[in-house]
Image (spheres, rainbow, N blue to C red):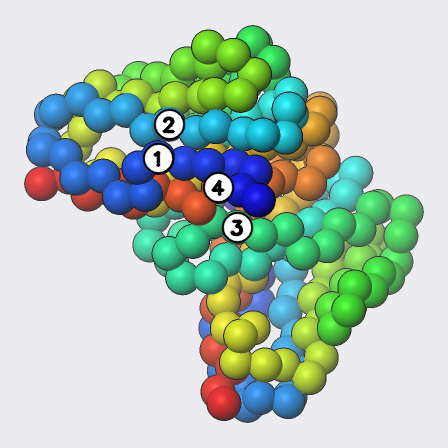
Amino acid sequence: DAMVIQNPRYQVTQFGKPVTLSCSQTLNHNVMYWYQQKSSQAPKLLFHYYDKDFNNEADTPDNFQSRRPNTSFCFLDIRSPGLGDAAMYLCATSRDWAGDTQYFGPGTRLTVL
Amino acid sequence: SQQGEEDPQALSIQEGENATMNCSYKTSINNLQWYRQNSGRGLVHLILIRSNEREKHSGRLRVTLDTSKKSSSLLITASRAADTASYFCATDEGATNKLIFGTGTLLAVQP
């Protein structure tokens, strides 16, 4: 049974055209994370929510925004995608804090034309 | 900041052989985790070892942790072609509620 679901799996957008990626979870976990992963690199944390508290990483560009309307759903909005934003975007959850096991979705591969 | 460095970056072995990957980190931790990532997929949690533990086993996986050296190793015994993947160590960064991933080891198991 899928626990962390990401949609779509593949997203193609044009330079500068806003895009929204979605993530949902059936685990009822408090924490949801968004990571960016470029080819052959480690996942890089963009931001996370602890319940409704939003925590942005200092080096996350303003171009990236997030929403968590309820416990189950979290969205990643890229307001004006650039070519450098092409990457895999991974959503993850954990029960309570980062040191807990994190459960990842399958990822959304974003292509920017 | 990327806390974990992994070694080797890439490893190619034959099916049936053992694979060892090493991870080093910089600051004190509460626990260390290992994840696997198949090409183009999300990460899958393999094992978590707490800072007061020295060794942990799960099936064909054996993880060791040496907090004095700030290092950990992941051993996969009797490897299979299906073990081909990237392996990442990850450490919690104190009270900041972040998990910092290492650079990863790309393991290729030849049938």
Task: Identify the amino acid type marked 1.
Answer: Asn
Q: Residue at x 46, y 10 (%)?
A: A69
Point out the image quarter for the C terminus of chain A: top left
- Element on which disc 3 rests: strand
* Relative depth, front residue between B2 and A49: A49
Query: Which residue position holds label 4?
Result: A105
Q: Is residue A109 visible?
A: yes
The answer to whether marks 1 and 2 mark residues whose Cβ atoms lie closer than 8 Å is yes
Query: Which residue position holds label 2?
Result: A22
Query: Which residue position holds label 1?
Result: A7
Q: Residues within 10 Å of mark 4 (few under 14, many from 20)?
A: many
Q: Residues within 10 Å of mark 3 (few under 14, many from 20)?
A: many
A19 on left or right of B34: left
Task: Identify the amino acid type marked 3.
Answer: Leu
Q: Which of the two discs, 4 and 2, labels the residue nearer the N terminus? A: 2
Give the spatial CA distance, label 4 vs label 1. 10 Å
Query: Which residue position holds label 3?
Result: B43
Give the spatial CA distance, label 1 vs label 2. 5 Å
Give the spatial CA distance, label 1 vs label 3. 16 Å
- Element on which disc 2 rests: strand
The answer to whether marks 4 and 2 mark residues whose Cβ atoms lie closer than 8 Å is no
> Picture coordinates of residue A31 (x, y %)?
61, 23
> Picture coordinates of residue B20 (x, y %)?
66, 75
Instruction: Check if mark 1 and mark 3 are on a common chain.
Output: no
Q: Is residue A58 visible?
A: no
